[in-house]
Image: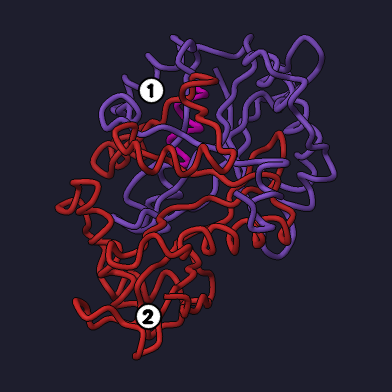
């Protein structure tokens, strides 16, 4: 199956983007963590100041796998971040191809498009996080020259959630 | 100690650049800093900024040994969680050594939290080096949790030749 198309996401893709976000979260065993709605995605991705960008992979009707009825079968969500030492970066938030469509080079092509976007926007690096238990993905990325900053340099990702954010913002 | 917390302006880039180098020295990696003052000016203060800054300033009579009144900063930007939506990422948080222990770091972080919440964010994310015990303790006291430890997420990077190679479709 060689026929697939990569394109920029449009507002009409929002239901499919949410569907794929949930599928990826399920794959990471975190399905109940997805609180985002179609309304959030529409407002945050297609307003005046988008918080994210998306690349979509779709297949024409005649190439759809008989088990699924979808035309949108993969996506990547990304945004630009900044490192005060080296400048602009591209941050890859989500990257997923439906199970039935893996092994055809779609993932590689999405990654190529993203890397191209990074280079064209003068980003010196592409960053992302991967769960250490996700061996298949870690191997996929390492084969393409990615390095594990947590292992190599000791970086730990920290988070503060809304409840504690509110407490912190109220402190004098 | 008397200090003010305010949004950074173009004129602050000289001091931000100075403090970025000080922070890199503290993290023992100052040879990795490739960004200059004019890059900061362009990237942070043009029409579509890639980051925002907050400055901590002390009055003239409390200035540092070298005569600086801008004694701390934070750089942050907005990101997006595909699970929870809008988020704020605190890229740098730094207070000059002689001004630590006076609540300035906490005040800077509080400001980033306020701005993040005002923008509709539900989480604040940042990274810390595993050997930086005093910072780790400070953050854990503020109610932060270690995503790398608890969920096993590793920070990954693809840069330089690897990025170029990937862009050309190489494996």
Q: Colour of chain A?
A: red
Q: Chain B is drawn in which colour?
A: purple
Compare residues B17 and A112 and report the one nearer the observer.
A112
On screen, residue B67 above or below A101: above
Compare residues A126 and B122 and report the one nearer the observer.
A126
Dot 2 crowding, Cα within 10 Å, few <14, some 14–19, many 20+: some
Q: Please report the residue visible at 48 percent of the width from the left and 62 percent of the height from the top.
A: A105
Residue identifier under label 1: B139
Give how far apart the Cα atoms at labels 2 and 1 are.
Answer: 39 Å
> Which one is in front in this view, the residue at disc 2 or the one at disc 1?
2
On screen, residue B148 above or below A87: above
Residue B110: tell me if it is visible: yes
User: Circle 2 — which element?
Assistant: helix
Compare residues B159 and B67 and report the one nearer the observer.
B159
Magenta segment main secondary structure: helix
Q: Please report the residue visible at 44 percent of the width from the left and 9 percent of the height from the top.
A: B133
Residue B44 is marked as none
Residue identifier under label 2: A13
Dot 1 crowding, Cα within 10 Å, few <14, some 14–19, many 20+: some
Residue B118: tell me if it is visible: no
Report the quarter where the N terminus of chain A lies: bottom left
Task: Specify the subunit that label 1 lies on.
Answer: B
Q: What number of labels is visible? A: 2
Residue B66 at what x, y percent from top left? 81, 13
Check residue B106 for magenta coloring. yes
Residue B108 at what x, y percent from top left? 51, 32
Task: Specify the subunit that label 2 lies on.
Answer: A
Q: Image check: B157 left or right of B82?
A: right
Corner quadrant of residue A20: bottom left
Q: Please report the residue visible at 57 percent of the width from the left and 32 percent of the height from the top.
A: B92
Q: Image check: A109 left or right of A167?
A: right
Q: Magenta stretch?
A: B104-112
């Amino acid at each position: 199956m060689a026929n697939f198309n990569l394109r920029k996401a449009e507002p009409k893709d929002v239901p499919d983007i949410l569907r794929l976000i949930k599928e990826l979260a399920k794959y990471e065993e975190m399905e109940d963590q997805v609180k985002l709605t179609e309304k959030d995605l529409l407002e945050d991705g297609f307003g005046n100041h988008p918080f994210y960008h998306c690349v979509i992979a779709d297949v024409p009707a005649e190439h759809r796998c008989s088990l699924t009825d979808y035309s949108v079968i993969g996506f990547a969500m990304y945004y630009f971040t900044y490192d005060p030492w080296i400048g602009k970066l591209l941050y890859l938030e989500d990257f997923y191809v439906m199970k039935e469509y893996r092994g055809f080079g779609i993932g590689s092509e999405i990654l190529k498009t993203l890397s191209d976007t990074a280079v064209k926007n003068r980003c010196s690096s592409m960053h992302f996080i991967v769960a250490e238990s996700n061996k298949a993905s870690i191997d996929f990325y390492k084969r393409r020259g990615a390095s594990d900053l947590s292992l190599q340099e000791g970086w730990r990702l920290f988070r503060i959630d809304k409840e504690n954010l509110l407490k912190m913002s109220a402190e004098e | 100690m008397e200090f003010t917390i305010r949004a950074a302006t173009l004129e602050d880039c000289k001091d931000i650049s100075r403090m970025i180098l000080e922070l890199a020295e503290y993290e023992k990696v100052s040879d990795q800093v490739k960004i200059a003052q004019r890059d900061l000016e362009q990237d942070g203060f043009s029409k579509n900024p890639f980051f925002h800054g907050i400055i901590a300033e002390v009055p003239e009579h409390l200035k540092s040994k070298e005569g600086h009144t801008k004694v701390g900063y934070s750089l942050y930007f907005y990101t997006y969680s595909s699970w929870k939506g809008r988020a704020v990422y605190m890229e740098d948080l730094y207070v000059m050594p002689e001004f630590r222990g006076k609540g300035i770091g906490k005040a800077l972080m509080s400001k980033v939290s306020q701005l993040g919440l005002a923008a509709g964010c539900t989480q604040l994310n940042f990274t810390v080096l595993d050997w930086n015990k005093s910072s780790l303790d400070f953050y854990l006291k503020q109610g932060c949790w270690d995503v790398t430890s608890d969920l096993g997420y590793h920070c990954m990077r693809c840069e330089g030749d690897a990025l170029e190679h990937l862009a050309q479709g190489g494996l």
